Image: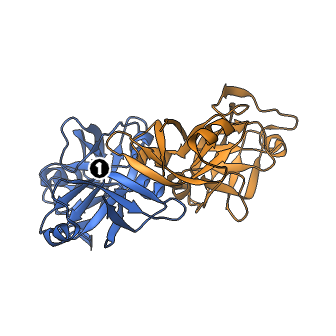
Chain colours: A orange, B blue
Amino acid sequence: MAKILVETSARHIHLTQEDVYKLFGEGHELTKKKDLSQPGQFSCEERVTVVGPKRELANVSILGPVRKASQVELSATDARSIGISAPVRESGDLAGSAGCKLVGPAGEIDLAEGVIVAKRHIHMTPEDARSFGVRDKEIVKVKVDGTGRALIFDDVVVRVSASYSTAMHIDTDESNACGGATSGEIVK
Amino acid sequence: MAKILVETSARHIHLTQEDVYKLFGEGHELTKKKDLSQPGQFSCEERVTVVGPKRELANVSILGPVRKASQVELSATDARSIGISAPVRESGDLAGSAGCKLVGPAGEIDLAEGVIVAKRHIHMTPEDARSFGVRDKEIVKVKVDGTGRALIFDDVVVRVSASYSTAMHIDTDESNACGGATSGEIVK
């Protein structure tokens, strides 16, 4: 079976345009720093502080472009360290997720919800989905082989779109748990 | 197959008697706070600060009794956060591992080595080893099923001793990666 690229997502934030204005000033547009593997997605020069009841995380990355809802993606280690109990969720599934405060140079906002631990997932092109024999929303297992910590991730959701580049995304806890693996193989 | 208890080890330190003296004062003996699942092992009232090149971790637990070599067990998230590159190792396999500074109320010590990320392992009684059909030092897979993050850990080393109570130990990164599973099943 062909290998899939495995990428580790560090903690990051997606913002609405309105929240960009509140944090960085009226009329502010996000400044692209670097393109990411997913077409059209980019990391930004702007940073914010994520504040929880116990502690805060400074200099957290923002990913662009702006979205319809602001979303904070933390590792479970991060969330616990700042005193937040964030659920494992797919991107965009924010109802009843955790809240936090975001602090930027021009202002701050209280998010009532939007803080999640990202559910591990594979972005996949329709061509690759056919080739791997998997469908959109299918749950698969992925075998990875990092240094001294090989494992098989279950509960990996496949998301198929022509706008994607094929890559599996895991968070820093998951990356550490598998010894920093950078490729994997779907196993049935 | 019978289930195995899975326990999560938070960051902790084992100390030599000599290092206890350096950190807490000449003649000081570790004060037991709570017995752990492994017979004879206990957490202590004493705490130390682990200092790396970038940052420090305050209030790190000490586990007793004292050992022949001091050893600091961090998650990979912890190690990276304080600027240390610690290898995945079995307990006691410290040659060439990472160093750090430890600061206690009576003094500090520079460990040239001893900082590791613990290799996941199962403490097992000889009776359970026979029942599970595994041997000392055997590498096995363990299937766990935490909330939304089921996975199968590979590279799990079995350690068999009559002085053990049967339990698998994983670190906080691994626990977060498997949704906080508390039991598992050896799969062949």
Q: Which residue is mark 1?
A: B119
Residue B45 seen in the current view: no
Taking depth in this image into account, of B129 and B75 the one nearest to the observer is B129
Residue B160 x, y percent position in the rendering: 16, 62
Chain bearing tag 1 is B
| Residue A154: image location, x then y, percent | 49, 55
Q: Position of residue A16 (x, y in %)?
A: 80, 45
Q: Is residue B36 left or right of residue B77?
A: left
Identify the element where label 1 is drawn.
Answer: loop
Lateral position of residue A142 relative to residue A14, left or right: left
Quarter of image, res B158: bottom left
Which of the 4 image quadrants contains residue B161?
bottom left
What amino acid is found at the position of numbered circle 1 in the picture? Lys
The residue at 87%/38% (across/down) is: A26
The front one of B151 and B84 is B151
Question: Can residue B115 be seen from the camera position used here?
Answer: yes
